[in-house]
Amino acid sequence: MSVRWGLIGASTIARQFMINAIRAQGEGEIAAVMSSNPERATAYARENNIPLAVSTLDALLGADIDAVYISTTNELHLEQALAAIEAGKHVLCEKPLALTSADARRMVAAAKVAGIVFGTNHHLRNAGAHRAMRDAIAAGRIGKPIAARVFHSVYLPDNLQGWRITKPEAGGGVVLDITVHDADTLRFVLGDDPVEVSAFTQSAGMAGSGLEDGAMCIWRFKSGLIAQSHEGFTTKFAGTGFEVHGSEGSLIASNVMTQKPVGSVLLRTANGEEELSFDREDLYARSLRQFHAAIRGDCQPSATGEDGIWSLTAAEAALQSANSGKAVKIDPKLGSMN
């Protein structure tokens, strides 16, 4: 079974990660790329050996493709995903799925009605490090999980300092860019759902008016576990990390909130310290392998549309909390609630 992909968006992430991940699948090929700028589409196709370049969504969806990868700016995801679903194409969409959780639910519901495979490109849950942490927790190696901490404040590279820090209308800001990932990774590793968040945001000099370039969140989960997360675009020298502390031990992961299969995971208990081994498979290649398996009917995407609704609802709640100064409840069926 071959899977012919169309790229909606001639993006940096597609060039750096997704094109190779698709081609790493024996049955995967990239048939077309769309950019609203015809010159960009043509140049991108030439540079990446893609046979067809188009500048309209209709032209892409009319091409001989089976699935689309959406990596345009956030405000465009809804319309593009709904059109792809109507055209009978499977959809792998970048996070956040849309600007609001209500729109994300529309996308996921439409895919379900149409019998379309719909996935959210939450790459971090495909990391071997996070899967090793999830397995250790599920096996009871740290006892009852009590608290967690995520360090995911980085420095946004110059080539990405565009709409993310200048366009609120495009869904810019660190919360919709990084907090969504942290909410999803916490859910995945802990096997638990957030029910409430309190958040502060800041503008530390990078983001333009109306946008945040830093955030700190305190999360409460269904089990009673509490977690904190730090997201940022402005910290040049911070490392990333993820800790989970339980009644019988702690997991301390370093350099794992990243797009590459790197980092380390340390298990610390009364017996001492043990470094956990984990696979170093490319995160995006694993995501694509599972997405192709989902198309065959063998499993679900590694992050489903419902997972994308959860992460966007959580980020939405964090923004509400930061704006209101109050804790906000999280319910993915209803969106965030005060």
Image (cartoon, rainbow, N blue to C red):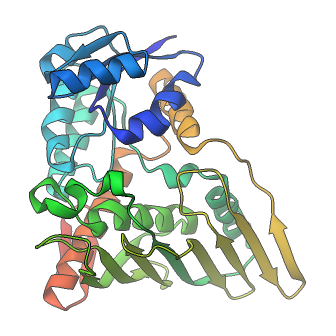
Instruction: For residue 195, say whether it is visible.
Output: yes
Identify which residue is drawn at 20% across, 58% down. Answer: 101
Question: Is 23 or 203 nearer to us in this picture?
Answer: 203
Position in image of residue 21 (x %, y %): 53, 31
Position in image of residue 258 (x %, y %): 54, 58
Give residue 172's quadrant in the image.
bottom left
How many marks can you see?
0
Question: Is 133 or 171 nearer to us in this picture?
Answer: 171
Position in image of residue 322 (x %, y %): 21, 84
Give residue 134's quadrant in the image.
bottom right
Position in image of residue 62 (x %, y %): 19, 11
Relative to 229, is 40 on the left or the right? left
Query: Which quadrant: the C terminus?
Result: bottom left
Question: Is 76 or 82 nearer to us in this picture?
Answer: 76
Question: Is 199 or 36 nearer to us in this picture?
Answer: 36
Image vertical order of residue 202 relative to residue 130, above or below: below
**What is the residue that sits farthest to the bottom in this orientation?**
325
Relative to 207, is 157 on the left or the right? right
Identify which residue is drawn at 16% across, 14% down. Answer: 59
Instruction: For residue 67, say whether it is visible.
Output: no
Image vertical order of residue 229 relative to residue 23, above or below: below
Identify which residue is drawn at 67% across, 70% down. Answer: 137
Image vertical order of residue 206 relative to residue 256, above or below: below
**What is the residue that sits farthest to the front in this orientation?**
158
Relative to 313, is 170 on the left or the right? left
Identify which residue is drawn at 39% across, 15% down. Answer: 50
